[in-house]
Image (tube, rainbow, N blue to C red):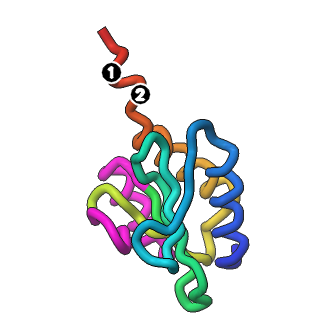
Amino acid sequence: MQGDILQQHARDIAASLEDVTSGHPFTPHLEVWKVHEKVFLIVTDDDPDLQIITVKVDPHQADALRRDVDTITSGRYLDKRHWISIGPGAGITKQLIEYLVHASYDLADDRELGRQP
């Protein structure tokens, strides 16, 4: 999958989720997606040499993904254990991006945590 397609697919998925906002709070080159003020997706902008997305993941899953897919690395801008960056390449599919964006959204959206007995 090419980088521009990867990034646009991640944006499309994020935009379809509930209670999501996006903006550029840190730098004009990082598009940040949040659910209830918690970051779940970062998309690099305006850099054809760095067409990546960064998502939140379970640390064990992050280890496996980094081991199994060459273009998945430790999170570029955030905690290296809980975030991964995904670049274009073999093994990166629309289904994988959809799964990772949804999983990141679920980890960041802690509304359900406060409602448990």
| Residue 95 forms part of the magenta stretch | no
Q: Is residue 94 left or right of residue 60?
A: right
Q: Residues within 10 Å of mark 1 (few under 14, many from 20)?
A: few
Q: Are marks 2 and 1 in contact (CB under 8 Å)?
A: yes
| Residue 61 forms part of the magenta stretch | yes
Q: Which residue is mark 2?
A: 111
Give the mark count: 2
Start-end of magenta stretch: 56-80
Name which residue type carries label 1.
Gly
Q: Secondary structure at mark 2?
A: helix
Toward which corner of the image does residue 78 lie, by quadrant?
bottom left
Residue 84 is tagged as: none
- Locate the C terminus and report the quarter of the image it occupies: top left
Q: Is residue 53 visible?
A: no
Name which residue type carries label 2.
Arg
Q: Residues within 10 Å of mark 2 (few under 14, many from 20)?
A: few
Residue 114 is tagged as: 1
